[in-house]
Amino acid sequence: MKDNKVFSHDTIIIGAGLAGLRAALEACKSTNVAVVTKVHPLRSHSISAQGGINASLSVDDSWENHAKDTIKGGDYLADQDAVEVLCKEAPDRIEEMEKWGTLFSRTKNGKIAQRPFGGASYPRTCYASDRTGHNLLHTLYEQTLRRGVVFYEEFIVTSLIINENTCSGIIAINLVNGDLVTFKSKAVILATGGYGRVYNNSTNALINTGDGMALAYRHNIPLKDMEFVQFHPTTLYGSNILISEACRGEGGILFNNEGKRFMENYAPELMELAPRDIIARAIETEINEGRGFENEYVSLDITHLGKDKIMERLPQIHEIALHFAGIDSTLEPIPVQPGQHYSMGGISTDIEGRTSISGLYAAGECACVSVHGANRLGGNSLLETIVFGRRAGFAVAMDLKEMDFKELPLEIYKNEKLRIDRLIGAEGKERIIPLKKELCKLMTEKVGIFRNKKGLLSARNKIRTIKKRYKDISIQDKGSVFNTELALALELGNLIDLAEVIVVSALARKESRGSHYRLDYPKRNDNEWLNHTLAQFSEDNIRLKFKRVKITRFKPEERVY
Amino acid sequence: MVKFKIYRFEKGKDSKPRFENFAIKEGEGMTILDALFKIKDEIDGTLSFRYSCRGAVCGSCGMLINGSPMLACRTQVGDLIKGKLNFELKIHGPFAFPSINKIDSMEIQIEPLPNFAIIKDLVVDMKSFFNGYESIDPWFIKKNGLDNENNMSQKEMKAIEPYINCIMCGICFSKCPSAIRDNKYLGPATLAKAWRFLADSRFENKKEMLKKVDSHRGVWACDTVYRCVDFCPKNVPSTQGITAIRRKLLLNKLIR
């Protein structure tokens, strides 16, 4: 590794998914922006988003309806002022994406088409067949190129530079040559996505290791509502590749091994279009009680839609089932099981994306505003990225007028270099991947859809042991060129920290709400738990604080579908 | 056990590449990407390759598998052994050759995508590919005077959609004879992108876009042998896009 190279940009954005790119487009109007990303922007996980993006476009729909659905879907844990922003801005953001060229699917009259989605009282999910994320990401990437945003691709951020409660840059490794470099900035926006890979049954890309959340956490920035982990009800049996909610939106039906449409028992009104937490629990229950196939999965049948409709509306799902399971979805049902999909929790921010540190912002899945509460509705995550990505970019542009570059203390770089050099030199007993597999298995088994005190406690203790063992890992690759083993080691460190936060937060919440289901506390308890959990790093134990949920116009009610 | 013969090279360290052999136990439904991870986890941590979505949508893991450029994440080890894929390959070109070779010796050979500089092992430098892409100013500018939620017919949307599906994996560029002759050729993916804009009635900058691709390194370099279409994992009809652009250019010249 060579000596400290320093790059300077007003605004540094970490992550080049939808939230990062949308933030970049906004911030670049008045500031010099660079995006630092560990993969090429078009490889970001946003590319995988399938079903769609919500907005109340129709005259028969309204932002209030959208907000009401979102809040009920989130089991009343969302901050309602934030949800209001999300739903009010949605139509403008969609219009803007259309203006920038996104190829939305159309109605017969040529308007942007919308499909029904889970937990929604109106068909308000806009889509681009079943490749909505792909279309949106390409569109935003094109527009950032147009605006001259600078990209540092295949750089892994190892640390934030925070001094006197102000963030003044980051340190990152250039994967291509192994250089550890410094980025000096006035503002940093974290847009690094979720941590799905802490579970072994995640739909997420392999790169989703919660890097930004872990970076923030280690700098004492609180992580909010981390016990809320979304399990998507329908992921492909075997590989857990996502099988979009759009399948059910278009009319897909779930069956158990008795050929029964079991959702009748769990959500008689909305059936297969109930929110994800409810369907995931239903499927898990069917499987646990012996009504699954091979004790592993249930059937998702879309054959009755007919080949034409499947090829028009769900071509990618058809392709995925064929390529990854050898199933022709026009002729036979798709085998599906629940899998980790999304993190409702994340870095605690206000509705402008500001964190507790001056000069540090967060947006997208890595942030928790919170708009999803205890369970996110399908179609709201893409919306969140462009609404709050833009707001974070805008806040930076405003705040930057009063911010300057700071002198960076050289010790910070020196210490970080020492840490990374030590990691590359590591010759311990533990191998990275087996250790990671242990962690993922543990999380899936003990911190999954159904939880209880005993399981959570044992998970916490085991994670702490894994944390100790992590200090004794070995890295075979001592090279500087494209050292992906080093990347895996850094990512594992992040996953272990986040696993501990998830478990500790889940242990604390003694109720069941949305995606967090405690077998030992099966009821929602609004008297004591209408609170956000804030988890903060401390050397010996994680510190937890609680903050009241903001309720404005939608009073908590019983949640039935 | 399945044998893997894998291309190894590190830029700045090795003077020439070599092949290394690994043997692993085949698992149910194991993809080439799974196999590479298994080798990295259990045998050699220094092996490098790109990956992200593992679901054939991000375009990270294009590589040469038994001589054919394919996505590692959706190519099953079992299929290579059986000599047939879960799905049918469509053959478009006049010189098409089988895209999957049956292997008798249970040996799978893996190399980086050809026609790119190599950074390490299976990781290639995609700069030349993306430079071409950026050179056409690949962004949308909407015509003035259209309403906000502009109308577009389902027919038009469906006509553009195949060109939008490109995941920029570089597989087309790795086997295109024109790109092999001239590394600065814009290439199938970029030209498919250009057609995506040109075919869109909402798009303002058609003249400028046509100018960018009207050159011996643009649409006129294509041999129209459909090699790109044969290998494209997303069935993007790049050659059809290129010939459509040519027709447009010729028509413009005639009218002028």
Image: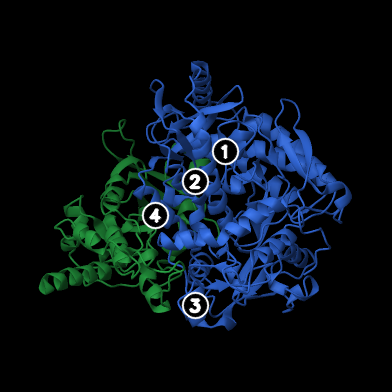
Q: Residue A529, image x and y in percent?
A: 83, 48
Q: CA distance from mark 2 to mark 1?
A: 10 Å
Tags 2 and 3 on a common chain: yes
Identify the residue at image location x=29%, y=58%.
B190
Find disc 3 in the rendering and name its residue. A107
Task: Give the letter of the green chain.
Answer: B
Q: Chain of mark 3?
A: A
Identify the residue at image location x=30%, y=59%.
B189
A284, above or below A334, in the image: above
Q: CA distance from mark 4 to mark 3?
A: 47 Å
Q: SS at mark 2?
A: helix
Marks 2 and 1 in Cβ contact (< 8 Å): yes
Sequence-wise, the earlier of marks 2 and 1 is 2
Circle 1: residue type = Tyr
Q: Chain of mark 1?
A: A
Q: SS at mark 3?
A: loop
Sequence-wise, the earlier of marks 2 and 3 is 2
Picture quadrant of residue A559:
bottom right
Circle 4: residue type = Ile
Q: CA distance from mark 3 to mark 1?
A: 38 Å
Q: Which mark is residue A361?
A: 1
Question: Is residue A17 visible in the rendered structure shown here?
Answer: yes
Q: CA distance from mark 4 to mark 1?
A: 47 Å
Find disc 4 in the rendering and name its residue. B108
Find disc 2 in the rendering and name its residue. A23
Tags 3 and 1 on a common chain: yes
